[in-house]
Image (tube, rainbow, N blue to C red):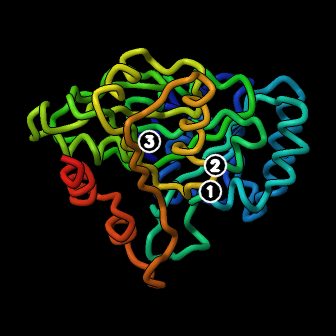
Amino acid sequence: MRDAFARAVMAGWNSPNHYFLTGDLGFMALENMEKSLEDRFINVGVAEQNMIGVAAGLAREGNKVITYSIAPFCYARPFEQIRNDICLSNLPVCIVGNGGGFAYGYMGPTHHALEDCAAMNALGVRVIAPAFDDDITRIIGEVSAPTYLRLGYDVRPKGMDAPSYAPWRRLLDGQRGALVALGPLAGVAWSALLDKPANQRPAVWALTEFVFDCIPEQFFADVEEGTLFVIEEHVAAGGLGMNLSHAMILLGTSVKNMVHRYALRYPSGRFGSQSFHRAECGLDEAGVRRMVEHLQ
């Protein structure tokens, strides 16, 4: 998804009032972007708090700005600067965190972003977790306020085209309730359940933005048919499951049953690849299939 992001920036961010700031990242990935943007590509070094301050200053002068780093370094380290410099003035800065969830695997918990969506949502930042590479071009073109963009890996089934971008998208039909997945986990669920007959699987939905005032009627219709499954590579507190539950309660909508799979942090006390951590939390393809089959 990082390469798709770089292509989208070069195509849609190349105007005199658009700037790109990186915290000394991008080797073997952003060189073409640097050439394209020239002096509007700024490497601020390993200084994320300063990067946010510089971004805010540029935005105050009428520019749009992207800041880019490994996910926890771009939202956790400069949290105060995001709150005070960007959010309180509602500035058009897009904070891009590469490697959401367990994506940086073996580097351990300092490099994992498991509470990022909750933290940014609490500040009123627009939270976007693209599910597919195709989503990014549309997203980049719509930055007009504080935004957090969580990049991961596009893992849709091979040869399948994703539906056009929308915060909520139905990827698979199904007659056993609805499964909604945050960001790239939608591709995991899509792959896991694609070969199951519709009468043996829930409908699969991709959720790419933390917006709950435009939930499609079709989603509610699917939920009425059975269980609501929620999966996210994020802790339970402040995540998709909690926000969706709150929204549905306020709307007076009930569910027959709800199953929530989320990042358990490190139940074994061991660290490994993203695949290892997903499997440990039941967020891999096998875990999704077991979760659905358990309630058949």
User: Which is nearer the eye, 155 or 117?
Assistant: 117
Which residue position holds label 3?
183
Q: Which mark is residue 238?
A: 2
Which residue position holds label 1?
115
Residue type beneath disc 1? Glu
Q: Which mark is residue 230?
A: none
Q: Position of residue 130 (x, y in %)?
A: 46, 37
Q: In which quarter of the image is the N terminus?
A: top left
Q: On the picture, is 219 further left or further right than 175? A: right
Q: What element carries label 3?
A: loop
**Residue 95 image-quadrant placement:** top right
Q: Which of marks 1 and 2 is nearer the N terminus?
A: 1
Residue type beneath disc 2? Gly
Q: Residue at x 45, y 50 (%)?
A: 232
Q: Which residue is drawn at 52% across and 70% down?
A: 265
Q: How far apart are marks 3 and 2 (CA)?
A: 15 Å
Q: Position of residue 267 (x, y in %)?
A: 46, 77
Q: On the picture, is 36 further left or further right than 278? A: right
